[in-house]
Amino acid sequence: MQKLNRRIFSDSTIYPSRIIQFGGGNFIRGFCDWMVQVLNEDAGFNSGVILIKPTKSGHYDNLAIQDNLFSSVLSETRDGRIFYDKKIITCINEIINPYENWKAFLDSAKIPDIRFIFSNTTEAGIRYDDSDNDPETIANSFPGKLTQWLFKRYEAFGGSQDKGCLILPTELIENNGEELESLVIKYSQRWDLDDGFRDWINQSNHFFKTMVDRIISGYPKNNQDYYWEKIGYQDEALVVGEFYHNWIIEDRNNILEKEMPYKIVGFNINSVDDLGPYRAMKVKLLNGAHTAMFILGTQMGLKTVAEAIKHPILGDFIKNLIQDEVIVTSGSLNELYKKFAKETFLRFDNIEMNHLLESIGLNTTSKINYRLLSSMNDYIRLYEKIPEMLTFVMAAFFQNYSIRIKTNEFKINDATEIIGLFKNLIQTYPNDKIRVIEKFIHDCEQWEINVTHKDQVINQIAHYWQSIDSEGIESCIIKFQTE
C-alpha cells in the first residue's frame, strides 16, 4: 500500500498562502483545514495555510514526511446507516517551527496575501507569560508570538490598513478573541512598541469571538489499518471525526461573510450578535460531559466516549448529571439546551469515531473551570444547595490525578506547574484530603467556586473523594441510581 505524498496524489495544486495557523493538532486540522479545503475546491477560496508550531514540545513530523498532506475521514449516522466523507487535505503549504527557524516565522509576516489567522492552542494557550520580556527573542506564549508576528507585519507594510488580519481563535475560553486582543495590546505596552502599532491593531485587524463544535477523535492508532484500507493508502497524519460541525462567530457587521464564502458550500457557520449564550450551552453540555466521562471513565477502565455513554452505569450517570444539574440552570434557554443535549448524546453514540477518553484529558485542570465549575456555581446560585453529581465528578478528578501520581501508570497530560503542585500537596498532606483540596483550589488560580458555599463544596468533594478511595468509583456511581 502506497504512502500519502504529493507524488501519488494527482491534484497537487499549491494555493497562495493567505492563512497563518497557530497549531497543527487533530482538531484544527479536522475543522479549519477541512473547511479551507472544501472552500478551495468548491468556492474558489484559493487559500493556502502556513502552519506555525506554537510550543516547544511535540512535533509535526508525521505531516511533514507526507509533503504536508493528510486525510480526513468524517462520519455520520443516517437512518441507522453510517455514511463517510473522505477527503485529502492539500491546503497546508508549509510548517514553520519558530524555535528552530525564527527568521522564517518573522518572514511569514511579510507575505502580502496573508489575510486570516486561525489558532487552536488549547484553553491554556491564551495566557500571559511574565517571562516574555524581550520582543527580539521568541515568546513562550502564543499571544506573545502573535504580537511579534503582527508587529513585524506592521513594520513591513508601514502600518497599511489593508494588511491587517481577520483573527479567528478556536480555543474554548470565554471571549477568546477579546482576550487574545487584550493580551496582544498588553505585550505591545510591555515591550514599548510603537503607539501606531496599537492603533493599527485596533483599526486594521479584527479579533473575532468564536465557538467551535465538531468531535474529532484524531488519529485511529488502535485501528489504523481499517482506515487505511478505507482510504486506499497509508496516512500517518489521518484525522477521524464526525461530519457534524458548527462554528458560531460573533460578527455583528458580517465582516467574515464578505471574505470567506462559507454560505456557498453550506457550512454550518453562523454569525451572531452575542456569542455568550451559545458558547455557555456548548461548553457546559458537550464539553462538560466529555470532561466528566474522561475523569470517571478512565478510572473504570473504559477507553472511548462511545463505550462511556453506552455503559449501563456511567452512561445513565452522565445523562442524569446533564439533565438534573446543568440543563436546570439554563433558564429561558431550557428548550434549546434540551434539544442540544439530545443531539449531543446521539453524536457520542457514534462508535465509528473511536474517540479516546485519554485524548480529552489534555489540560483538564483549566478545562474544569468552564466545563464543570460554571455549572456548579449556577446551580448553587439558583437553588442555594450543592449539586451532588458535579461535586462527585470533582472528587473523582482528585482521585484520578492522585492515582496517576502514585502509580505512574497513566500520564497526567496537564501543565507542568499543575502536576508539580498536585504532587507536592499529595506528598505533604497524604491523609488530609480537605487540606489538599483547599490548597489546590487556592494555589492553582484557575478555578472559581461560589464563595458563599466554598467550605461546603470542599467538604462535599472531600467526602466523595474518601468514598471513591475506599469503595471504588463504580460502586459510588451505582449509589446515585439507587438514591
Image (cartoon, rainbow, N blue to C red):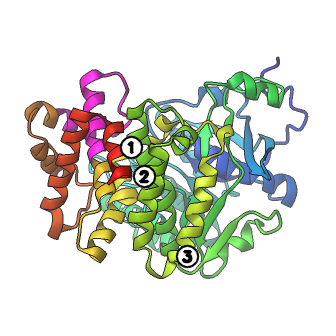
Vertical placement of residue 473 versus 328, above or below: above
Q: Position of residue 462 (x, y in %)?
A: 17, 47
How packed mark 3 is, by other alpha carbons closer than 10 Å (few <14, some 14-19, many 20 or more), is few
Judging depth in this view, the residue of 12 and 449 nearest the camera is 449
Instruction: Report the number of discs.
Output: 3
How packed mark 2 is, by other alpha carbons closer than 10 Å (few <14, some 14-19, many 20 or more), is some
Q: Marks 2 and 3, Cα distance to the nearest angstrom?
A: 28 Å
Q: Marks 3 and 1, Cα distance to the nearest angstrom?
A: 31 Å
Amino acid under disc 2: Glu
Q: Is residue 415 magenta?
A: yes
Q: Residue extending furthest right?
A: 10
Task: Tell me the element at label 3.
Answer: helix
Q: Are marks 2 and 1 in contact (CB under 8 Å)?
A: yes
**Mark 2 or mark 3, whichever is nearer to me:** 3
Q: Position of residue 27 (x, y in %)?
A: 59, 46
Vertical placement of residue 452 versus 84, above or below: below
Q: Which residues are magenta?
A: 395-423
Amino acid under disc 3: Glu
Residue bearing the label numbered 3: 335
Report the residue at 51% width, 56% height from top.
286
Residue bearing the label numbered 1: 363
Location of residue 153 by image quarter: bottom right
Report the residue at 86% width, 26% height from top.
8
**Mark 3 or mark 1, whichever is nearer to me:** 3
